[in-house]
Image (tube, helix red, strand yellow):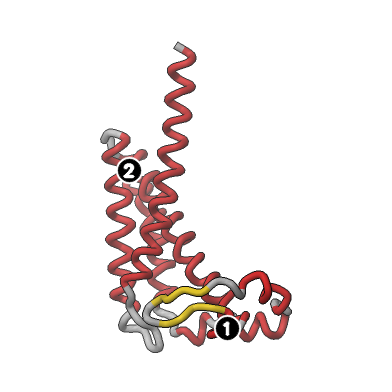
Amino acid sequence: MKIAYWLLPISWMGVIFYASSQPYEKQDIKPMMAEWLDVSFLEPYLSWIHFTYHNKEISVDSLGIEQFIEFIIRKGTHVTVFFILMLLFYYAMVMTTRWLFSARLWVSFLLSVAYAGIDEYHQSFTPNRTAYIGDVIIDSIGAILAGALIWFIYYVKSQKKMTKT
């Protein structure tokens, strides 16, 4: 029944697939922010941030404070979602393989990045959404952060074992 452990990452991939199937208008949080939150107080603290993403200037000046915050939230969601996917892949690997730690970690990372690419390609078929390699890179950062956490926990546990013996 080891296959059941793979239901976790597969289910999470289904959640990601569903979210990528939604047109931008269904995920737009700007109207909610405008109605429920006054975020204008953040403008002086964030106005110094300027960068280009997907050939578009990202700044409070160019987007307005609500759209700028929405951009940060959306990209933060990319990181978080693929952080979780990496953890779920790694957990499934631990529970179903006898591979070395490093092999489990690398395969989990590669599966996460591969799915990021597949998901971005899938998103290109969704109305008012575009596929962009920059999003795959951001997704990969989430997987890298999860891998770093896994490695850190592994390292701490191995150090504790060494001090006990």
| Residue 120 point in image, percent of width and height | 33, 72
Q: Is 7 left, or right, of 24 in this rendering?
A: left
Q: Quadrant of residue 17?
A: bottom left
Q: What residue do we see at 51% from left, 74% from top?
A: 50
Q: Residue furthest front?
A: 48
Q: Quadrant of residue 124?
A: bottom left
Of badges 1 and 2, nearer the viewer stands 1
**Mark pair 1, 2: CA separation:** 41 Å
- Locate the N terminus and report the quarter of the image it occupies: top left
| Residue 74 point in image, percent of width and height | 50, 72
Q: Amino acid at mark 2?
A: Leu
| Residue 135 point in image, percent of width and height | 38, 69
Q: Amino acid at mark 1?
A: Asp
Where 87 sits versus 61, above or below? above
Where 158 sits versus 136, above or below? above
Which label belongs to residue 105? 2
Q: Earlier in the sequence, mark 1 or mark 2?
A: 1
Q: Nearer the viewer, residue 88 or 159?
A: 159
Q: What residue do we see at 48% from left, 69% from top?
A: 75
Where 21 sits versus 143, above or below? below
Q: Quadrant of residue 14?
A: bottom left
Q: Secondary structure at mark 1?
A: helix
Q: Residues within 10 Å of mark 1 (few under 14, many from 20)?
A: some
Q: What residue do we see at 41% from left, 76% from top?
A: 53
Q: Is 29 left, or right, of 132 in this rendering?
A: right
Where 128 sits versus 156, above or below? below
**Which residue is under mark 1?**
61
Q: Is 106 left, or right, of 30 in this rendering?
A: left
Q: Secondary structure at mark 2?
A: helix
| Residue 97 point in image, percent of width and height | 28, 38
Q: What residue do we see at 35% from left, 51% from top?
A: 6
- Locate the C terminus and report the quarter of the image it occupies: top left
